[in-house]
Amino acid sequence: IGIKGRFGQWLQTFLSRQGFTVIGSDIGTHITNIDVVRRADVVIFAVRLSRMASVIGSLVPYSRKSQLWLDIGSLKKEILQKMLRSRAEVAGMHPLFAPPHEMSWKSETLVLSTTRLKRWSKWFGKFIATTGATVVRATPDMHDSMMVFTQNLPQATVLALAMTFADLVKSPPSNLLKFSTTASRKVLALIASMLANTPEVYGDIQVGNREGVAALDALIDSLKLIRKLASEGSSDEIALILGSLRSLYGEEFIAAGKNGFVR
């Protein structure tokens, strides 16, 4: 369900190549969401995050005990609560990456929340193994809390930088590349990546995770402190903060970061 989206198309191709018969629905398709749930043994929800819970909720009455329901949403708590109202077995998936060009998730990370899985356990395990993904298991609550730090805050920071550059740079922002350091090129690459992707994805993440706003307040407090120290000329204080952070994060983290955190 959501077969026209990027992940929906990827899953259609991947599962078809595995020998499965794939049907799908989306806006404008002759097959409806209800048709999919009535006919399919395994139902995968790949719709926009802001619509995921409501779409799932509308299809609960058509579920069967013999089915497996999966989702690929980037939030888990509310989505899995909706799926658990169905009669189907349930597992949540969150690919921590955009749909790849290759028909493999090798070297990519997939978070799993297997909340009600019995009859389909063996099939699901084989399916996940076939993708080649590195699996991280988490409860829905843990997953959504961690996403604040790996999605909400980083994406909000990149968005804020893009907005600030657009406001302050007198020439086209692309001219920044001529003067960029190694580190700033990485930042500009993140901005370019965000601008190349579907914008609604980022809006849904910022709005959908209820823990995100408090984290943004904490980020603003950190920026206010940096601004205060900069305006006071307190370079030594900024250096002390960095020294403290180095001890907190640890040398192993720093060394791995120098290598790009290769998985």
Image (cartoon, helix red, strand yellow):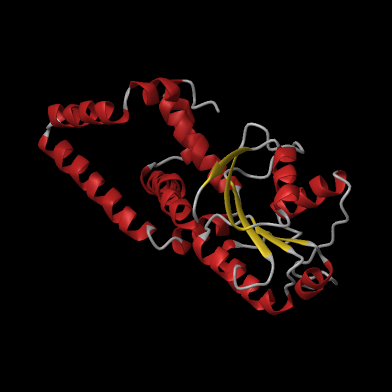
Viewer can see residue 37:
yes
Q: Is residue 211 above or below residue 248?
A: below
Is 65 on the left or on the right of 18, as rendered? left
Residue 108, given in percent of the width and then of the height, sits at: 62, 36
Q: Is residue 40 above or below residue 256?
A: below
Query: Which sits in the foreground, 245 or 6?
Result: 245
Looking at the image, which residue is at 28% across and 55% down? 217
Residue 199, given in percent of the width and then of the height, sits at: 56, 55
Q: Is residue 231 above or below residue 152?
A: above
Query: Which sits in the foreground, 128 or 230?
Result: 128
Residue 8, given in percent of the width and then of the height, sits at: 73, 55
Is 11 on the left or on the right of 251, as rendered? right
Q: Check the picture and name the quadrant holding the C terminus.
A: top right
Looking at the image, which residue is at 56% across and 56% down? 201
Looking at the image, which residue is at 59% across and 68% down? 84
Q: Quadrant of residue 198?
A: bottom right
